[in-house]
């Protein structure tokens, strides 16, 4: 073979080998791209998480959907099998987002994903009844044989649930005077009025009991009225017991003057200091002026109402001593989980990565303990979902209080590996 022939043969072989290399390279590139695409598609399933809660108290619903990062997704709220609304979530670059939701009714709610979030497993939670506080206000002086009206207010200890149902008026010793139906007053407060005709002179004790409903737990309050032969122009209708931080209505009542018009000014006397509450309040057609007051300090104090008629020719003053108590002790709570025991503040515990731990809670007040998480963990109803890998979560428990206890909150640290 001469040199020219050898050169041509080598060129032909090089071309063939080059084409083969190109084919192999393209095939390898295709495999790499396919593997990359498969890896890109292997995203974890989306998650919807929220803990059991309490009506009227906001809960945080969390969504994790990495495949839907930087998008807005929606979930459907279902109550008793009927869709009642939607929640929107804007997911960040990691595919995480949250939305605040306040359950309006007790019982079971289901939250399920819509659209791109429909692959998430629907979560069903149970919303508990809220604790309440009841306030009974009777007039400090009433006239024998003349009907008088007492007012009962009922409010949730936290949140904005509107209590419904009835209150029962009794003497606290077995005698029931009657039942009144609550009416909404606004901002989570409901009230009922009850008319009572004093049979004779003397001091009468009353207890108002809010009868538990599906959405709100029972509570009660007591007050007394001094019945005399003839009442003054102005009497006060306020409770004798107050608690710091709990708003209560104060009323001035005009007696035996059906055509009296005018206004009342209210003040609180504490020692030598007299603090006025707002401005003058006009009398309604029933001869009653009402304002709201939230005590801020404890101890014995005096409520005073100064009433004058439209022409400023007639005036009257009424006073009543009251006792303002401090809020009750923080509601004691117990939070525990298998393999973690009873959780303690400032004492971290370690959970197994990838585990699902049922969390048990209890409060001294009888209120439901609400849970929320911080970090990569999730709460689904009463189950703590721990991710894989290694890291730290926080679990926060809170109670609205009630039955003599004030609200309480505690945060626990959970490491996982």
Image: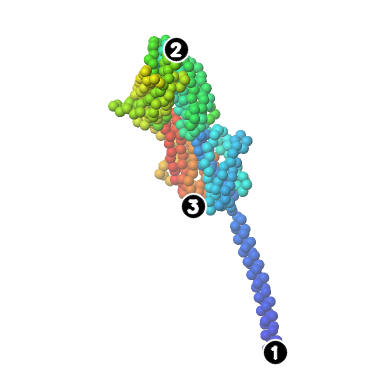
The residue that disc 3 covers is 390
User: Could you tell me which residue is drawn at 67 percent across and 81 percent down?
Assistant: 11
- Residue in the foreground of this view, choosing between 167 and 19: 167
Neighbourhood count class around disc 2 (C-alpha, 10 Å): few under 14, some 14–19, many 20 upward:
some
Quarter-wise, where is residue 122 in the image? top right
- Residue in the foreground of this view, choosing between 20 and 274: 274
Judge whether 328 appears above or below 381 on screen.
Answer: above
Visual colour scheme = rainbow
User: Could you tell me which residue is drawn at 42 percent across and 33 percent down?
Assistant: 406
The Cα–Cα distance between marks 2 and 3, rounded to whole angstroms, is 74 Å
Q: Is residue 203 visible?
A: no
Which of the marked residues, 2 or 3, is nearer the chain's N terminus?
A: 2
User: Could you tell me which residue is drawn at 59 percent across and 49 percent down?
Assistant: 45
The Cα–Cα distance between marks 2 and 1, rounded to whole angstroms, is 138 Å
Residue 2's disc is 1
The residue that disc 2 covers is 146
Neighbourhood count class around disc 3 (C-alpha, 10 Å): few under 14, some 14–19, many 20 upward:
few
- Residue in the foreground of this view, choosing between 339 and 206: 206
Q: Position of residue 373 (x, y in %)?
A: 49, 44
Quarter-wise, where is residue 259 in the image? top left
The Cα–Cα distance between marks 3 and 1, rounded to whole angstroms, is 71 Å
Is the residue under label 1 in contact with that under label 3 (CB below 8 Å)?
no
Is residue 18 left or right of 239 when viewed as pictured?
A: right
Secondary element at image label 1? loop
């Amino acid at each position: 073979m001469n040199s020219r022939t050898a050169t041509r043969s080598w060129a032909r072989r090089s071309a063939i080998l080059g084409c083969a290399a190109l084919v192999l390279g393209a095939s390898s590139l295709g495999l790499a791209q396919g593997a990359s695409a498969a890896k890109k598609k292997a995203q974890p399933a989306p998650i919807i998480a929220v803990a059991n809660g309490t009506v009227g108290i906001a809960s945080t619903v969390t969504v994790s959907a990495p495949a839907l990062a930087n998008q807005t997704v929606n979930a459907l709220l279902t109550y008793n099998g009927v869709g009642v609304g939607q929640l929107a979530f804007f997911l960040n670059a990691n595919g995480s987002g949250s939305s605040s939701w306040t359950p309006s009714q007790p019982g079971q709610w289901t939250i399920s994903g819509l659209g791109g979030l429909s692959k998430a497993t629907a979560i069903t939670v149970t919303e508990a009844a809220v604790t309440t506080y009841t306030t009974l206000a009777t007039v400090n002086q009433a006239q024998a044989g003349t009907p008088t009206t007492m007012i009962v207010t009922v409010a949730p200890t936290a949140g904005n649930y509107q209590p419904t149902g009835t209150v029962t008026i009794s003497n606290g010793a077995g005698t029931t005077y009657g039942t009144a139906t609550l009416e909404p007053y606004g901002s989570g407060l409901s009230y009922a009025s009850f008319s009572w005709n004093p049979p004779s002179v003397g001091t009468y004790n009353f207890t108002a009991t809010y009868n538990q409903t599906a959405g709100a737990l029972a509570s009660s309050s007591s007050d007394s009225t001094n019945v005399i032969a003839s009442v003054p122009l102005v009497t006060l209708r306020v409770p004798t017991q107050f608690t710091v931080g709990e708003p209560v209505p104060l009323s001035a009542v005009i007696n035996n003057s059906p055509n009296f018009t005018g206004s009342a000014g209210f003040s609180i006397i504490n020692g030598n200091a007299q603090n006025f509450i707002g401005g003058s309040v006009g009398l309604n057609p029933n001869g009653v002026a009402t304002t709201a007051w939230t005590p801020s300090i404890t101890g014995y104090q005096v409520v005073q109402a100064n009433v004058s008629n439209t022409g400023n020719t007639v005036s009257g003053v009424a006073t009543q001593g009251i006792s303002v108590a401090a809020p009750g002790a923080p509601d004691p709570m117990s939070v525990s989980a298998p393999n973690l025991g009873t959780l303690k503040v400032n004492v971290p515990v370690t959970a197994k990565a990838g585990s699902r731990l049922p969390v048990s809670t209890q409060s001294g007040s009888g209120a439901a303990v609400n849970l929320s998480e911080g970090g990569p963990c999730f709460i689904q109803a009463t189950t703590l979902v721990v991710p894989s890998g290694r890291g730290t979560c926080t679990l926060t428990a809170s109670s609205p209080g009630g039955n003599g206890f004030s609200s309480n909150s505690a945060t626990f640290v959970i490491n996982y590996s």
